[in-house]
Amino acid sequence: MYYRSLNAYLRETFGCKVYKLALSAGCTCPNRDGTLGTRGCIFCSGSGEFAAPAVLPIAEQIVQAKRLVAAKARQDARFIAYFQDYTNTYAPTDTLKPLFTSAIDWPEVCALSIATRPDCLPQEILSLLSELR
């Protein structure tokens, strides 16, 4: 069986190292907001370990996240806009679209990664993601 890592695929595809930039959409989760529970899931700390505060605009979050990887990233590095904390599809599409679009509009951003739950992917969110693709 052949195994190819994501790192190898990204290097081959983009010709350089690709780093994740941890971002926050400011979403919550049905296991935290009272819809299904209030304590969260066992696999999610919910802290967004490296994401800047969600109150900051996405552009500022990207600048801060790039500073965190600056010491190891070369000038030609590319980035994945990674919406990390909580469930980043747990909001209306008119809230999420400008956030996701703002992140992928950066020329150095080559991919969008969104932490979410399978039960938080209604058709309108799937349509948005398809449109952004």
Image: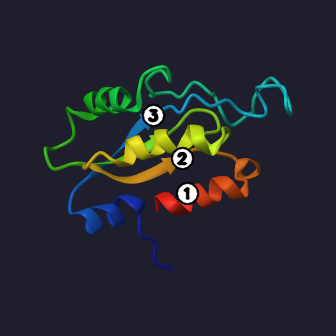
Residue sitting at x 72%, y 47% = 120
Label whose residue precedes the other's in the sequence (1 or 2)? 2
The answer to whether the residue labelled 1 contacts the one labelled 2, judged by CB atoms less than 8 Å apart, is yes
Q: Position of residue 25 (x, y in %)?
A: 53, 33
Q: Describe the element under mark 1 as helix, strand or loop.
A: helix
The residue indicated by pointer 3 is 23
Q: Residues within 10 Å of mark 1 (few under 14, many from 20)?
A: some
The residue where tag 1 is placed is 129
Q: Residue at x 29, y 68 (%)?
A: 13
**Quick one: 110 or 100, which is closer to the camera?**
100
Helix, strand or loop status at disc 2:
strand
Say what amino acid the circle numbered 2 marks: Ile
Q: Nearer the viewer, residue 49 or 109?
A: 109
Residue 74 figure quarter: top left
In the rendered structure, which disc, 3 or 2, sits on the residue that comes first in sequence? 3
Amino acid type at mark 3: Leu
Q: Position of residue 82 (x, y in %)?
A: 45, 43
Amino acid beneath label 1: Leu
Q: Mark 2 packing: few (<14 Cα in 10 Å), some, or many (20+)?
A: many
